[in-house]
Every structure is written in structure tokens, then in C-alpha cells.
Amino acid sequence: MKSVMTGNQAIARGFWEAGGRLAASYPGSPTVEMLESLKEYEEIYSEFSVNEKVALEVAMGASFYGARAMASMKHVGVNIAADPLMTFTQIKINGGFVLVSGDDPGMASSQNEQDNRIFGKFANMGILYPGNSQEAKDYMKIALEMSENFQMPMLLDITSRVCHSRSIVEMGERVEMDIKGFSPDREKYTMLPPHTFKPQYEMVERLEKLSETAYDIPINQLYEREGTDTLIIASGLMYYNLLELDLDVSIYKLGLVFPLSVKRMRELADRYSNIIVLEEMMPFIENELTLMGIESKGKELFSFTGELHIEDIRRGLKKAGIIEGVDESEAPKLQMIPRPPMFCAGCPHRPVFDVLKKAKVRVIGDIGCYSMAALDQWDASDIMISMGASVGITKGMNKMMRRNGDHAPLVSVIGDGTFFHSGMTGFVNLLHQMDEEDNMTFIILENSTTAMTGGQHNASSGNFNSADDMKVDIKAMLSAIGFTNVREVDQFDYKAMKEAVKEETGRKGTSVIIATRPCALRFKIKEKNFYVDPKVCIGCRTCVKTNCPPIRMKEYQGIDKLKSFIDPDMCVGCSVCAQVCPVGAIKRSR
């Protein structure tokens, strides 16, 4: 049986077919759909953990007990999971283990562009690199087999375009794998000196054995053409993009990108005088060849950043002399109308940032839907780095401001999902060396979901939705650890939100405001819509400046001046526009 699947769906299917038992993840594009897809397979326990480190540790526990396990996350999530990962890879595994990293060339949905093939090598893992959905499914199964055969965790590195693109997949049946159980062995599982010295050598030995296997492994294929002295080495999607050009060159397609077979690569170097490496982002394979003493060309021809499309490959190969006479203007340029991201109608974040912008305070943001506050159309946030970083950054900036005689208030905004992911430790650290001269206000946006990645639950979702089993009370938690000034505000009460921000930023100390409105999209919140009375409206655009999607200016018949208008099909009745209107021109329909 065949089916059209995304790469994410195919990885989930491959894990199920291979007898997978446990999968853990933290939602982050481009890998969210993997765990979402696994929910349909009742044989697999799956969970979105509170962060990537915990997800990795949950999957590690299953592997220790002899079950096939996987952890999936976006590329920056591996940074969060690095602490346990770098020790876990020393251990001879029990149950097969695969870490799936979703890399994001071009940063379509990420704050950086990180090539985790380098991380895989750093962690002494074998690395598989699929280029379409069929390979995504097959490579997951192969990775689990390799993991058990070589007793090492494997990395399945996949890019965002392969995660989301669809292709035909040949389906297979599930192969049930026994759960082996756990046999205590402190020398194996307790990574403390002196037990840690022997595993260092064993890691090298495992990689050397895998390198020997790589010599003729079926997922590494050589496609030769007679009469050419050029060999192009490609993997993943780059191989399939290269095929579109139908060039008279030989191609070495890599499925296992690390470790490479030194013997195989030197044989190819003896046969081909012109070796070109086609890869996105970092010169990973190119550098591996350099370490082997093999000359090749790569990043001097192709960009080190962004995705490499067919036209980019064509330009690079023209530079290399492989293609002649390429006309840069031969392909028509498709003009796309820019569509900047925006908050949804009824989004509870919108009134918060409208208040902050009008308050003219310095705002330090974090990762989530509210990251959009840093975009030009909002201009309401000044810093945004990584998950949970806002808390520590705010403290560090505050301390230097005070020493520099700067007594302006600082506001930090963090979502509830990010708070549970990596913000809690930052809040605990705020209690260290607190000063009465501090002026820090932290706003926690408790919308009861991980909204930016599709509405997955977080640790406080159960406070609003009985179907969720975690009901952490953020206010109670902060009070328990020592914060004395914590207040909850319904941000759709615009006046109350405005007064809370004014009061807390206007006095010294550390304060926390918890904005309590849930996500309108996740929980399908909709009330009777609002409309504009054009005869009352003065065209001041105060409502438009809240950046709510249903609101725009338009011409009304018989009225010369543009007046605001609310699309009744889009309005969910949040009432913020009516509250900011200075003349009462916006009213709720009956």
C-alpha cells in the first residue's frame, strides 16, 4: 500500500513500523507533526514534554529499559538537550535510540540557522540525512537497526522542506520488538569517574566500525557516467534538486553522512579529478574530505546560508565550469505580495503590546507568538534571543542600568509555555541579590497553550481545558518560591491592563503580572462581533493601531473621510477596539 505523506508523517510511520515504543518531543517547527502523527499509533507511548531536555531524558529512560525510543525537536532544541545528550552518547545503548533534529536552512521559522550534522559529530553519533518522505521513513528504521547493531544513539537530521513536503511512501507492517528490560550495570550506566574513561575509547571504536560499514552501505549510492572527471557528492534534498539539472557528471549520493568511509572516499578521489560537494549551510562533508586529505570544492560555489534551490545550484555549477551559457534572466521572476505575520483576531497578546507600546517602556521579549511584537508593524519589543532568555537578560541589563545611574523601568514578556520550558529557573535566579532599587516588571502571558506551533498543551492548560492533565497555578508557584508582588489581570479589560503596567513600572522592586486570557484560536473563543458607526467615528485610527486583522479603513457611501470598518466574519468579539475608541463609535452587535 502507498500513501502520500510529509517527511514528518513518514518518520512517525517508520518508527511505528520498526517496533518503536516511546517517543517524546517538545513542539517546535519543523518537527511538530512527527509527534502529532504518532498519536494515532496506540502501541506507542508519546508525549510533548515541557522542554527538549526532558523529552530526551524520557526517551533515554525507555532505551535504558530496552525499548526502541526516539526524541524529536527542532535544531535549537538540541542545544537545550545537549547536557544529557553528550553523556548519553558515551553509553552502549540497550534499546535502539534515534534523535531527530529538524534543521531550518533559510530560517523560515527559527531565530538562527544551525547545522546539526556538526552537533551529531560533536556528540559521536552516526548521522542519517533523508531527502524525501520515503527516505525519511526508511532511514528511521535503518537508524534504529544501526543503533542496536553498533550500540550507539543515532541522529536523523532532516531539513524543514523535507519535513513539510509530500511524496509517495510505500507502507509496511509493524514489526514487534521485545522490550528487553533493564539489567543494573553501574559501570555501564553510571557516568562518573572512573567509569567514564573506558566509554571514550568505545565511542571511537563504534564510529570506526560504522565507518567500515559505510564503504558499501546501500543508502550510499554511486551513480557514474562515462567520460566525466567530475563527481558531485550530495545528500538529502540536494541530491534530488541536482537530478533536475540532468548533468553529464557522476554523483555520489550519501544517506549516511557521518561517519564517511575513508577507503571509499579515497578510491573516488583517485578516479575523479574534480570533486564538488553540494550541501546546504555548513561545509560539513567538504570539511570531512579535507581531513582525509581529499581536495574538493563546495562553499566557494554555493552559499553557506539559506536553502539551495535549483537555480542556486545552477549558478554554482556555472561558476565551477560544469554548466555553460546559463542566462540569469531565463527564468521569470515571480513577484510575491509580502504577507507579514500577525496576531490572530481575538489574540490576547495584542492588547498587552498595545499598552506597552503606548507606555513607551523598554521591552525584552521571548520566543512564542508574541515574538511578533518585535516586527515593524508593532515596534513594541526590543530584544528577542531564545527560549526563556528574557528573564536572565532583564536581570543583567537591570543591574548595569542601576550602576550606570539609569533608573528607567524594564519590562520582560514571556509566555506560559516558555515559562515552563526554561523560564522558571530564571525566575528563581531573580531572587538572588534582589535590590530595592530594581525596577523590573515581568509579564507572563498565560494563554494556556503552546500557540506558535499549533496549540499543543503546556503545564497550565488544564486550568482552562479539562481534557489536559496538568493544572499548574503559576501565581501559586511564584508565591511559593518567594515572589511577593504577583497579580493576575484579564488583558481584555484594557483599562485594568493599562493601570497594572503603569503601577508596576512606576515603582521600584520586582513585580509579576500574569495576563490570564486563553488563546482564542486554540480554544475557539468567539462572541458577538463589533461594528463601527461611521457617523460617530472620527477616523483617528486608534482602533486600527491595535493591529487586529478585522479592522481597516474604508470609504462609506455619502461620507468623504475614511472611517474604520470591522469585518464581521473575522471579528471574534474581544472588545479591545471598542475600549480604545475615544468617541464610542464601536459597538457590539445584538
Image (tube, grey):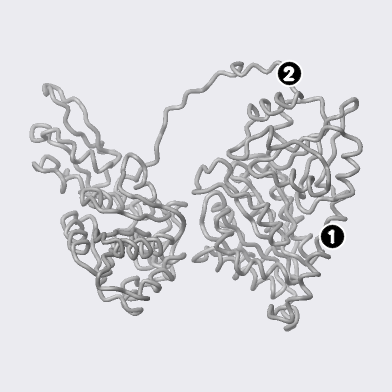
Which class describes the residues within 10 Å of circle 1: few (<14), some (14-19), or many (20+)?
A: some
Total numbered labels:
2
Could you tell me residue 114's position as x and y percent?
59, 49
Residue 535 marker: none
Could you tell me residue 298's position as x and y percent?
72, 37
Answer with left or right where residue 83 lies relative to residue 446.
Answer: right
Which class describes the residues within 10 Å of circle 2: few (<14), some (14-19), or many (20+)?
A: few
Residue 208 marker: 1
Answer with left or right where residue 252 lies relative to residue 552.
Answer: right
Q: Amino acid at mark 2?
A: Glu
Q: Nearer the viewer, residue 90 or 333?
A: 90
Whether 473 is drawn above or below 332: the answer is below
Quadrant housing residue 589: top left
Whether 423 is drawn above or below 17: the answer is below
Could you tell me residue 122's position as x and y percent?
69, 59
Q: Are marks 2 and 1 in contact (CB under 8 Å)?
A: no
Q: Residue at x 39, y 50 (%)?
A: 371
Could you tell me residue 489's position as x and y percent?
23, 63
Looking at the rendering, in which quadrant would you find the N terminus? Answer: top right
Q: Nearer the viewer, residue 291 or 1?
A: 291
Q: Amino acid at mark 1?
A: Glu
Q: Residue at x 76, y 70 (%)?
A: 200
Q: Earlier in the sequence, mark 2 or mark 1?
A: 1
Q: Residue at x 60, y 58 (%)?
A: 72
Whether 569 is drawn above or below 157: the answer is above
Residue 324 marker: 2
Judged from this view, the residue extending furthest toward the front is 404
